[in-house]
Amino acid sequence: MALHTTSTNSLKQVEWMWKSNPNPWSESESAIWSHYSDVENLIIEEAFTDQQSLALLDDYCIDFQKNLQVSNIDCNKRRPVKRVVRKREDKHLREERFVDLPVSTARSFGGQYGWMSPFVVEVRRDLDLKIDELPSKKPTMVPMLVEKAARGIIEEGKYLKKEREAEKMANMLREKKNQDMKEIWKCCAYLYSLESFLYKTLNAAMRLVGDEKHENVWRSKIRTLGPFCLLLWDDPINIKTKRGTTLYRGAQLTPEQIASYEDMAKNSSKLGSFQAFSSCSRNREKAEEFGNTLFIMKLDHAFTADLRELSEYPNEEEELIIPGVFFSVEKVELDCKANKHVIYLRLFQADYGKLKLIYLRAPNDIENKVSVAFLFSFICLLNVRRNNFLLISFDKCIEVLNRSGK
């Protein structure tokens, strides 16, 4: 991946850290060193390599001559910093990225969206795109989308008071504006893999879809983070579903959340879906380090993206589940030795035949029937880019599904 050379090499070989002891000048305490975010590291190392006297971050500046972190608000608040050269495989693992709940079980089939995330659909509507208009299919629209994505990242950064981080990521993306979609997607995947506000804010918004109390929140992100989301979702490299792979993810679940998965395991017609981009690992031992629950996910056939070669954390063996992947719960077990619940999922990319079968087997009530029809309608839209379906209306879905059962 041909990103900015200084940036890429800096994360692979160098890490900047700040002394986080309550009293950073105490000589009696053991030193505690904390990590800067990945994007902050890029900013600091680039300034250091360019032989600048200072690196300007959102909350601090780094004084290279004195090896100090100085508050932008109070210049008397200072802490030591250090530059650590280490091997790529020495990097710390990121618990937060792999331990939050990847899917929502709080909402059932009912409602406008069921438990599918229509975030990508809403982004397409906001951009006024036609059915066949996607960046991977229409190269002329790519520069416009890249610019909108860059501006959206900066706007979110300003809101979160992370403007310098946002500008750094936006500029990295803009550097790819006139390249082909594969290079732009690699850049988006790389930016997503970094430890920053970008992946956290995007996924938090996507997982709120269907929550009436927070509808204004997730809809507000369509304009700002929607273009970046579309560029990441419209993957021109991983165009075939993967089969037979097993992925793992830790989670910290409440008893009520575990019970909801147990309930799904008892009813084969109950499905869930990944509303957001969800990071998993191909390494079970790594996933078992996190949380009180282990998800073991077998891919029947589903769209995922291997980020290992793009990520600065190859030891995480990260595989990204793309929004729109469905799952059924096979079983829920308690591993007494590890003191963890283990939830077995089967992941699949829904197609007409599978949804027809689910529709016919669903309990004969309007809530279940309508929900499966909504899923069918949404899958038709999601798969336009794969040339598997024509887009049809919800009413047509009901008609087709009912007719197929006669």
Image (spheres, rainbow, N blue to C red):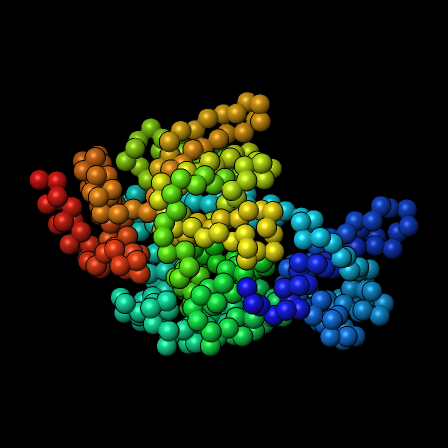
| Left or right: 190, with 121 as reference point | right
The residue at the point 31 percent across, 51 percent down is 113
Q: How many marks?
A: 0
Q: Please identify the quadrant where the C terminus is shown.
A: top left
The residue at the point 52 percent across, 70 percent down is 173
**Relative to 374, residue 390 above or below:** below
Percent of width and height locating residue 76:
82, 66
| Left or right: 222, with 109 as reference point | right
Work out whether residue 337 or residue 213 is closer to the camera in this orientation and state it.
337
Of all residues, the one furthest to the top in this rendering is 336
Of all residues, the one furthest to the right in this rendering is 27
Q: Is residue 404 visible?
A: yes
The image quadrant of residue 118 is: bottom left
Q: Please identify the quadrant where the N terminus is shown.
A: bottom right
The image quadrant of residue 258 is: top left
The image quadrant of residue 206 is: bottom left
The residue at the point 78 percent across, 64 percent down is 69
**Relative to 137, residue 342 above or below:** above
| Left or right: 216, with 335 as reference point | left
| Left or right: 374, with 169 as reference point | left
Percent of width and height locating residue 253:
50, 37
**Relative to 356, residue 234 above or below:** below
Q: Is residue 290 visible?
A: no
Work out whether residue 330 or residue 179 is closer to the camera in this orientation and state it.
179
Percent of width and height locating residue 116:
34, 50
**Relative to 288, residue 2 above or below:** below
Work out whether residue 264 or residue 50 is closer to the camera in this orientation and state it.
50
The residue at the point 26 percent across, 47 percent down is 351
